[in-house]
Amino acid sequence: MSETIKNPILRGFHPDPSIIRVEDDYYIATSTFEWWPGVRLHHSRDLIAWELIGYPLTRISQLDLRGVGASQGIWAPCLTYDQGIFYLVYTIVKSFYCNMYDTENYLVTARDIRGPWSEPVFLNSFGFDPSMFHDEDGRKYIVSMATDHRVPQKYAGRLTLQEYDPVKKAMAGPARDIYRGERIFLEGPHIFRRQGWYYLFAADSGTGEAHGQSILRSRSVWGPYEMFRDDFMERTDENEAYSILTSRHHEDILLQKSGHCDLVETKNGEWYMVHLCGRACADRNPEDARRFPGSRRYMMGRETAIQKIRWREDGWPVLEAGGVTPRSEVPAPDLPAPGMDSGEGNGSFAEPFVRDDFDGGILSLDYQSLRVPMDGHYLSLSARPGWLRMYGRSGLSSRYSQTLIARRMREYHMSASACLEFEPDIFKQMAGLIFLYDSDNYLYLHVSRDEDVGKCITLLRAENKKYEYLADYLPVRENEAVYLRMETENAWTQFFYGYSETEWQAIGPRVNASFLSDEACDEGWFTGAMIGICAQDLTGFGKHADFDWFEVKTL
């Protein structure tokens, strides 16, 4: 096969990839943080085309995100497979921007990747990024990074290993540190076994532009582990990690922030590693920014890419292309092309989901909501067939009950539009099109009612809890649908409204939307920009808004 794989393979907010192969099928799990349902699962047969097939955490009994902060919730899931069973371990972060983190680690299992998935088994709360390792003798282990609330911390970073008893469904025996870093911080660990060696594969140096991937090995699962060090690894000082993959010294390449890798072997013995990455926009934080002064902005957050690797004669893995920097195109594996399963189809990256006419009985898998499932309390596809009815609930800052569904921003040149029928009675009732990063950062084009103007439309900007209306309350027609639209080019975004899809009136100025990014937000910085539709009713009576269709497409 002479095809190439074009990176990123999962575009837009898809961080912390974990990959497995089961016979001819490849599966990737990625983090979802405060977005519901929990953990996105993608499927491929060739490592080129990927299809969204579902979420394992779809019940409140598995995942309760009510009240969690921005960029908390589900962190770094690890997907594994052993003896006919899929295993998924994951962290629910409930407090993070504080001294003592709350990082609860759980395990769910399934016989079928598409579910149903089990009720969760509690593992531990040592830290985040847990991973399960299945040894050749049948024993199972959980490895994770361990947080340290002491001031100062005793080590820059540590990784902890403990055995798991699958019969008792509980941790067994003592937990032991297998890595204590004086200077190099490691997280996102995975353990592999190959040719008598245990390999400890771990992300290094945070998750920003200094991010990278280190690897260590030992003859015993308990260590001691030796870190792979070689002259080809680019380092500028003794505190820098020994990374087999990183973008930290190459600001000019496409795939920045590269690290947090996982390995997979194809059926014919080729090896690949998936990793997170980011594509920067042209804008930077101001030099006096509270966090990350001068840093480039990444509106789409961290995405998933793939690299081909080879094993050297001395048993260490390296990029097949040489060096340490990720490539935007890599050789595809030499495999037959059986084609993708039909699946749900709408989530396929080979055939992007563009317009939703809301004609089906269920929402597309591509949508996610904030913290809570969108059951009948929030929306209905049957109350008005062919339309999505949304019942207004809490305000956009709520961490408990927002009526909102959204899809990922996947490119810097894109548009989104929707057709809305909504007859608000009071200014506290709103519905419309939203471009958001988290509950404190968004651009919201919405219909409401003003005492003087009547039914109206306006544009609200929220940036780190600073709120500003970018347009006057403009009157719109009573008892008639309003069409909403936004167009984004290199972060610059213009909003429009009208009464058909062929005639648009600009509303508000052309806005630099790059503040909807990892680096620019004061609280969250692990997700990515989303485009959605939503409704609020601050009277508490649940005024409904009807959407005929919603579209997001690349320009």
Image: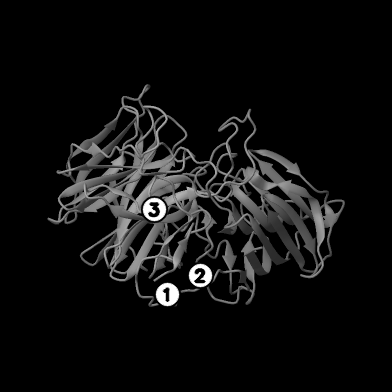
Depth check, mark 2 against mark 3: the one in front is: 3
Image location (x, y in percent) of residue 553: 63, 65
- Vertically, is 418 above or below 466? below
Q: Nearer the viewer, residue 516 or 49?
A: 49
- Vertically, is 414 above or below 125? below
Task: Specify the farthest residue to the top.
Answer: 152
Q: Mark 2 or mark 1: which comes first in sequence?
A: 1
Whether pointer 2 and pointer 1 mark residues with C-beta atoms closer than 8 Å, the reply is yes
Image quadrant for the C terminus? bottom right
Image location (x, y in percent) of residue 483: 75, 65
**Amino acid identity at mark 2:** Ala
Residue of label 1: 340
**Amino acid identity at mark 3:** Ala
Residue 240's image quarter? top left
Label of residue 350 in the image = 2
Q: Residue at x 16, y 56 (%)?
A: 167
